[in-house]
């Protein structure tokens, strides 16, 4: 399976541009390097990193499983973590389009936000709130003194007041149990799951929920999950499932693209447009990212070289009309 390019939009799983008369080849960054799948295979051993330069990304495990989101926002604020902000209009649009698709089922399909953490994408999708307001809320000095119970009680009211009329059901999957429980408690998620699909199969409860899922969303999780998780999710799907994912340019998404293709999904990515994810923690991380992007055939000039991780947006939809 190879990668083809029409203009700046790349269709993964189609013939290579080099095989298309008049086809323009593009690199990872929308440049002029050819980037067929075999090159990705040589470059990256799979999602989650690049062989030879793995382990270069700073870890934030200590802020993922707190009882509430305050430490998460406090820690990420100086790093300007912003990918959920870029995903917000995209996920709203894709969720609307997916909900409009008549798949013969009486209820609206659910969105499954994978690596959902404290329900940030669910908050931004279904509520009139911005990521900037969430940073302000969870880092404000007044809220640092509150107990988690007090914060949760106030969040429940805050989000209920901002609930959008077009809100869709959102399920969350994340191995960090305290985080998803918080999101559930304050009403951001309709159901929460902590199954680690990298290590095992979906529980019966998750299996039942997967039958309702019509859209999978992902931000900030491309370094943590692999095709294994996507296989488990799609094996359990009973409705047409679309995937909308923002994945770092330091990570190869191709193993996942291949697995999605095996489930009848065609993936597109506009390589000319990248989305800043966050500042690097230090020069060591910057050097790691520059090297990782280069290994995957990308050009870090003007992007990673300038101090930010950048993500690409991948959209996967059934390849039948
Ligand atoms: C960088 S955070 C992203 C959170 C949120 N999506 C955002 O963009 O703000 C990565 C999340 O992936 C979760 N994670 C790590 N390994 C996972 C796995 N195997 N399955 C599901 N979630 C996982 C972590 O617990 C963490 O909450």
Image (tube, grey):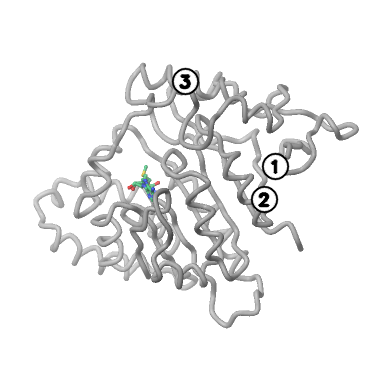
Judged from the image, the secondary structure of the residue bearing numbered disc 1 is strand
Q: In the displayed image of the protein, which residue is found farthest to the front?
A: 200
Which residue is located at x 62 percent, y 25 percent? 42
* 112 is higher (above) or lower (below) than 228: below
Which mark's residue is nearer the viewer, 2 or 1? 2
| Circles 2 and 1 in contact, beta carbons < 8 Å | yes
49, above or below 85, in the image: above
Among the 4 quarters of the image, the one containing residue 225: top left
- The residue most toward the right is 21
Q: Is residue 103 left or right of residue 161?
A: right
Residue at image mark 3: 52
Percent across and percent down for residue 218 are: 48, 50
The label shown at residue 261 is: 2
> Where residue 43 appears, x then y in whole percent?
59, 25
Give how far across and how far down residue 310 sits, in percent: 49, 32
Mark 1 nearby-residue class (10 Å; few <14, some 14–19, many ≥20): many
Give the mark, 2 or 1, whose residue is nearer the N terminus. Answer: 1
Label 3 or label 2, whichever comes before in sequence order: 3
Residue that appears at 50% across and 57% down: 232
Query: Tag 2, which secondary structure?
Result: helix
Residue 83 image position (x, y, % from top left): 44, 42
Question: Between residues 41 and 110, which one lies in front from this camera angle?
Answer: 41
Residue extending farthest bottom: 106
Q: Earlier in the sequence, mark 1 or mark 3?
A: 1
- Distance, label 1 to label 3, CA atoms, is 25 Å
Choose mark 1 or mark 3, whichever is in front: 3
> Which residue is identified by label 1?
12
In contact (CB < 8 Å): disc 3 and disc 2 = no
């Amino acid at each position: 399976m190879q990668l083809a390019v029409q203009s700046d939009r790349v269709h993964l799983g189609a013939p290579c541009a080099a095989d298309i008369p008049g086809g323009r080849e593009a690199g990872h960054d929308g440049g002029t390097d050819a980037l067929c799948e075999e090159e990705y295979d040589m470059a990256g051993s799979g999602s989650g990193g690049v062989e030879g330069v793995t382990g270069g990304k700073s870890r934030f495990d200590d802020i993922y499983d707190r009882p509430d989101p305050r430490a998460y926002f406090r820690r990420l604020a100086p790093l300007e973590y912003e990918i959920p902000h870029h995903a917000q209009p995209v996920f709203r649009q894709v969720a609307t389009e997916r909900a409009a698709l008549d798949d013969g089922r009486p209820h609206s399909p659910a969105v499954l936000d994978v690596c959902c953490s404290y329900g940030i994408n669910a908050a931004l999708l279904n509520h009139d709130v911005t990521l900037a307001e969430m940073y302000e809320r969870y880092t404000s000095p007044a809220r640092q003194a509150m107990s988690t119970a007090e914060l949760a009680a106030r969040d429940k009211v805050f989000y209920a007041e901002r609930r959008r009329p077009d809100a869709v059901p959102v399920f969350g999957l994340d191995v960090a149990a305290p985080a998803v429980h918080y999101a559930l408690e304050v009403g951001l998620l309709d159901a929460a799951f902590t199954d680690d699909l990298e290590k095992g199969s979906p529980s019966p409860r998750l299996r039942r929920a997967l039958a309702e899922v019509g859209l999978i969303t992902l931000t900030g999780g491309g370094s943590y999950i692999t095709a294994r998780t996507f296989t488990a999710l799609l094996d359990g799907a009973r409705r047409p499932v679309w995937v909308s994912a923002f994945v770092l340019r330091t990570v190869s998404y191709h193993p996942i693209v291949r697995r999605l293709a095996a489930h009848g999904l065609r993936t597109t990515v506009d390589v000319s447009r990248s989305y800043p994810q966050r500042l690097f923690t230090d020069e060591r991380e910057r050097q790691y990212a520059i090297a990782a992007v280069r290994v995957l055939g990308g050009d870090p000039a003007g992007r990673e070289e300038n101090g930010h991780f950048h993500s690409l947006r991948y959209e996967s939809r059934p390849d039948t009309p």
